[in-house]
Amino acid sequence: MDTREDVLSEVFGALADPTRRAILQRLAQGEASVAELGAPFAMSQPAISKHLQVLERAGLISRSRSATMRMSRLEADRLREASEWVDRYRRFWTDRFDRLDEALRAFQTDASASVSPTAPESDSSTAAGAVPDSADPRNP
């Protein structure tokens, strides 16, 4: 596994947790302290710090100390790398679906062309289930 895949594994692992995604969403608005980031969650400050460590290890945030506060900020480059990776597969699946649409349209066109027009109305005496007079054993 190359370094880029290791980085992507770290990024997607960090993004797998809804708390960490919410933290990133908050940091998209600007830097924040651990207390500010933890305020919306019913968890301890050490638990929030562990989430921040995971995000920092993945390169999604950077942290700095300002006097007695530890501030966190979003580092969007890794998100861009992950987005580019996902986009390659989005293009792959979009191409596949486009080809499937073309095949379905061709199939529908072929199917509608091979359907014969409705048969003309038949004589009521020879309608389905009726026996023609010449084949009726009661009629010599």
Image (cartoon, rainbow, N blue to C red):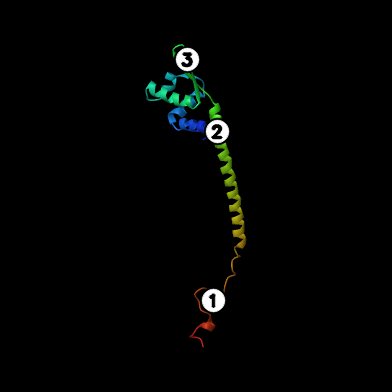
User: What amino acid type should be assigned to the residue bearing mark 3?
Assistant: Arg
Left or right of 47? Residue 32 is right
Left or right of 127? Residue 47 is left
Check disc 1: other Cα within 10 Å, few if <14, some if 14-19, many if 20+.
few
| Residue 54: quadrant of the picture | top left
User: What amino acid type should be assigned to the residue bearing mark 2?
Assistant: Ser
Q: Earlier in the sequence, mark 2 or mark 3?
A: 3
| Residue 93: quadrant of the picture | top right
Total marks placed? 3
Label placed on residue 34: none
| Mark pair 1, 3: CA separation | 96 Å
Q: Horizontal and vertical percent for residue 30?
A: 51, 21
Label placed on residue 65: 3
Q: Which residue is mark 2?
A: 83
User: What amino acid type should be assigned to the residue bearing mark 1?
Assistant: Thr
Which circle, 1 or 3, is nearer the viewer?
3
Residue positioned 50% across, 23% down in the render: 61
In the orientation shown, which residue stands out farthest toward the top? 67
Name the secondary structure under disc 1: helix
Residue positioned 61% across, 54% down in the render: 106
Along the line of sight, which residue is nearer the eye, 140 or 111? 111
Check disc 2: other Cα within 10 Å, few if <14, some if 14-19, many if 20+.
few
| Mark pair 2, 3: CA separation | 30 Å
Q: Earlier in the sequence, mark 1 or mark 3?
A: 3
| Mark pair 1, 2: CA separation | 69 Å
Residue positioned 44% across, 24% down in the render: 53
In the orientation shown, which residue stands out farthest toward the bottom? 140
Q: Which residue is mark 1?
A: 126
Q: Horizontal and vertical percent for residue 103?
A: 60, 52
Q: Horizontal and vertical percent for residue 22?
A: 46, 28
